[in-house]
């Protein structure tokens, strides 16, 4: 009698990688070890490019029937691959690279352990997380559709990205944003807009910054939205509305001190203020915004030009992520 396991279809991994940001030889060596240990077929390797940052490669993976796709790159590569995987059933494993790695940070994944990351791709457990779906309308009424995993933002964060020197970012990482932040804070323009939550009535308001978040943590463990979770089926939305230096102090105290320090203990939580005028939190599954003037918008840390309108909604459990077996 023929051994049933000898005729069973063997699994195969695919790696989509940013050739600028990863040490391909180091990754290939670890992947080969896991292939042999788990008796998988030879891995498919697909580099991204300027013309295809990941969406097209992800669709190739869907057509190939791979068991898992390992994404080796920064936040932009992860977002692009997730966009290409939308609607499919192949899980994604993260091999973080670059300066941000915001999704990996929010999932509490190791940022510098190649062996663990690759082992997780081959042996990890599946966890479904939410996707953010966004339609952006430009001043000329052209529209585009994208996904995001961490957050979409207008105002301070988007303008800061637009002011960031890309060459300096490559050399100095997050230090490159210091100069950009200083330039951005000189911009006194407020966002004036109408918005609607969950297809409710439209309201007019103003704010310095709008952030629609699927995750709450920023680099350096800054907790912008402490109640945000990647799998709760809702967005956590922050409106920053500082009035001069006092308003910025309120935001700093709320985000750095209260969210980052006091919230960690029961005694500390008792000392927290419920809300400050400079920072408002709301939750929703959908948000529509129509701006008075086109403004810069960012998705997961990458600039996406100027938006006159946008509409976001949650796709609950829209992406499957591989986590370590003990998670």
Image (tube, rainbow, N blue to C red):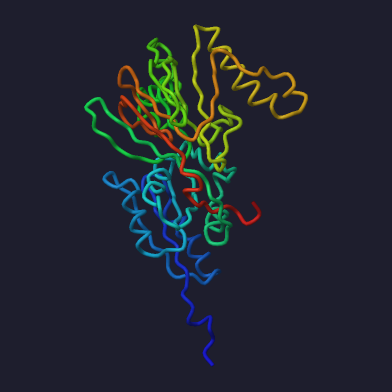
- Nearer to the camera, 42 or 137: 137
User: Measured from the top left, where is residue 285 in percent x and y?
Assistant: 49, 35
| In-image side of 100 versus 258 (left or right) | left
- The one nearer the camera, 178 or 311, is 311
> In the displayed image of the protein, which residue is found farthest to the bottom?
1
Direction left: furthest residue: 140
Q: In which quadrant of the rendered view does residue 41 lie?
A: bottom left
Residue 99 vs residue 52: left or right?
right
Residue lying furthest front in this view? 201
Residue visible at 41% across and 43% down in the picture: 79
Res. 306 image quadrant: top left
Residue 210 in percent (x, y) is at 45, 23
Of the pair 205 and 48, the residue shown nearer to us: 205
- Residue at 34% of width from left, 35% of height from top? 135
Q: Split into 4 quadrants, where in the image is the N terminus?
A: bottom right
Whole-percent x and y of residue 132? 44, 39
- Residue drawn at x 38%, y 32% as measured from the top left: 311
Residue shown at 47% from the left, 48% from the top: 318
**Picture layout, residue 312 above or below residue 25:** above
Q: How many marks?
A: 0
Residue 18 higher or lower than 276, as above or below: below
Residue 177, given in percent of the width and then of the height, sits at 44, 24
In this rendering, is residue 60 above or below 37?
above
């Amino acid at each position: 009698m023929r051994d049933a396991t000898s005729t069973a279809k063997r699994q195969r991994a695919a790696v989509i990688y940013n050739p600028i940001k990863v040490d391909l030889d180091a990754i290939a060596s670890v992947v080969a070890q896991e292939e042999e240990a788990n008796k998988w077929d030879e891995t498919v390797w697909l580099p991204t490019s300027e013309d295809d940052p990941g969406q097209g490669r992800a669709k190739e993976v869907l057509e190939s029937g791979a068991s898992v796709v390992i994404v080796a790159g920064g936040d932009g590569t992860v977002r692009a691959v997730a966009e290409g995987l939308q609607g499919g059933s192949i899980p994604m494993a993260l091999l973080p690279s670059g300066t941000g790695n915001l999704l990996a940070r929010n999932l509490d994944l190791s940022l510098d352990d190649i062996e663990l990351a690759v082992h997780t791709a081959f042996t990890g457990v599946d966890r479904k997380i939410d996707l953010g779906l966004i339609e952006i309308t430009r001043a000329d009424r052209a529209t585009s559709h994208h996904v995001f995993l961490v957050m979409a933002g207008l105002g301070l964060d988007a303008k800061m990205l637009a002011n960031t020197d890309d060459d300096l970012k490559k050399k100095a990482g997050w230090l490159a944003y210091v100069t950009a932040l200083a330039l951005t804070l000189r911009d006194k323009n407020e966002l004036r807009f109408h918005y609607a939550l969950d297809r409710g009535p439209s309201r007019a308001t103003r704010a310095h910054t709008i952030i629609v978040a699927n995750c709450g943590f920023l680099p350096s463990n800054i907790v912008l939205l402490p109640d945000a979770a990647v799998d709760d089926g809702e967005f956590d939305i922050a409106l920053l509305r500082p009035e001069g230096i006092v308003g910025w102090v309120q935001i700093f105290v709320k985000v750095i001190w209260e969210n980052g320090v006091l919230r960690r203990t029961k005694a500390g939580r008792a000392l927290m203020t419920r809300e400050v005028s400079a920072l408002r939190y709301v939750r929703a599954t959908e948000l529509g915004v129509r701006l008075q003037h086109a403004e810069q918008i960012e998705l997961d840390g990458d600039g996406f030009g100027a938006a006159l309108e946008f509409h976001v909604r949650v796709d609950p459990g829209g992406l499957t992520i591989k986590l370590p077996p003990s998670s």
